[in-house]
Amino acid sequence: MSTSEHDMTPTPTFPMARTCPFAPPDEYQRMRATAPVVRATLPNGAPVWAVTRYAEARQILSDPRISSNTGRPERPRGPDDDRPDDGFFVDMDPPEHSRFRRLLISELGARPMDAMRPALQRIADTAIDELLAAGPPADLVGMYARRVPSRVLCELFGIPAGDHEFFESRLRMLSVTSMDPSVAAQASSDVRGYLRELIRSAEREPHNGMIRRLAARHLPTGELTTDELINIGFLLLLAGYDSPANTISLGVLTLLRHPAQLAALRADPSLLPGAIEELLRFHSVQDWVSFDRIAADDMDIGSARIRAGDRLTVLAASANRDARAFENPDEFDIRRSAHHHVAFGHGVHQCIGRNLARAELQIAYGTLLTRIPTLRLAIGFEELPFADDAPFFGLHAMPVAW
């Protein structure tokens, strides 16, 4: 690694525990005050440049000299993975990356996601019905925050109702919030095998779900291979489960802890889209684990000299609390204009599922707040089990009553 004037400061190591559920690790503030990039250490002991500030985060995420092809070894593998990197387009650079994103726009663009809203509403209503039937106290995380995203993914993929429980159980096993590597490896194998069967059924049901549609459209032409499509599906499942699940539960908790803003939101539902952007900024649940990069060329960031081959990770939770970009960044404010946050990334790698995520969050929050207006915590705030040092920050459980 290269040297800088900041080499004498203590080197922080990931993951860093949060001492406050509504704030990133305390170390982030010190790092952000120190420099735009700070030396740190990954869980495997490898050195990394941690990008701490908003402007530099956007620079790194959009700079063509910064590569996403890091060859990350920590991805869950299954025994049937012949070429496990085929189709993992988040770890690719243009033009390979662009090819895969272009094929997915027809499924994940704004128009198809708008068309999916009635199904999202049905999913949220059903989950609320089940929550109410269970009676208080009930676990909002297990019965709603995780159930909604898993069923949304089943809907998107065309999973038949009889297989929902199988699919949802495998998503829970793959959860990054509390991942057991051996359990995750088995779940990965199960999910990949299931996706392979979906692809095989595309000839019989070419329009039933995203995976079958992509298979029917692009396998015969050679634009995609079966292995690529399996990995695309697996990647979308990983991205589409933990992040919205944790954002739903943390968002509900945040609103309960800010009753005046919750009341304003109930009185004026038009505030909901802006409130969702603020919740995405405020919590940044993905943080460092989703923004791994490597320098393909020498470059300077602030006073640091980044060398080709140096690894970088963008701290989204730090960038989204940068006072240079957001006034009073540690305050939660549903009226804030927070659309420029980097919770979904930035540049060519900006989350391709962001349209689905926004629609899903809007319906999940809106339905819950409308149908259970007296929702409250069933235990003390200090008793809540947070995933303090997990790659995706969230709650293990959240007992609620009404």
Image (cartoon, rainbow, N blue to C red):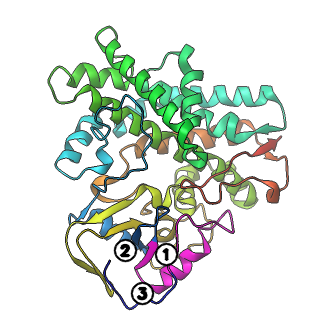
Describe the element under mark 1 as helix, strand or loop: loop
Between the residue at mark 2 and the residue at mark 3, the CA separation in whole angstroms equals: 22 Å
Q: Amino acid at mark 1?
A: Asp
Q: Position of residue 391 (x, y in %)?
A: 54, 55
For image coordinates 37% across by 69% down, the residue present is 57
Disc ID at residue 7 = 3
Q: Position of residue 257 (x, y in %)?
A: 74, 59
Image position of 52 with respect to 114: above or below: below
Instruction: Judge the density around disc 3: few (<14), some (14-19), many (≥20) Cα neighbours within 10 Å.
Output: few
Indicate the quadrant where residue 132 lies.
top right
N-terminal of the pair, mark 2 or mark 3, is 3
N-terminal of the pair, mark 2 or mark 1, is 2
Magenta span of residues: 11-40
For image coordinates 28% across by 11% down, the residue present is 203
Q: Is residue 38 magenta?
A: yes
Between the residue at mark 2 and the residue at mark 1, the CA separation in whole angstroms equals: 9 Å
Between the residue at mark 3 and the residue at mark 1, the CA separation in whole angstroms equals: 22 Å
Q: Which residue is mark 2?
A: 55
Q: Position of residue 134 (x, y in %)?
A: 80, 28
Q: Which residue is mark 1?
A: 322
Instruction: Answer with left or right where residue 296 lies relative to residue 76.
Output: left
Residue 174 is at least partly visible in this image: no
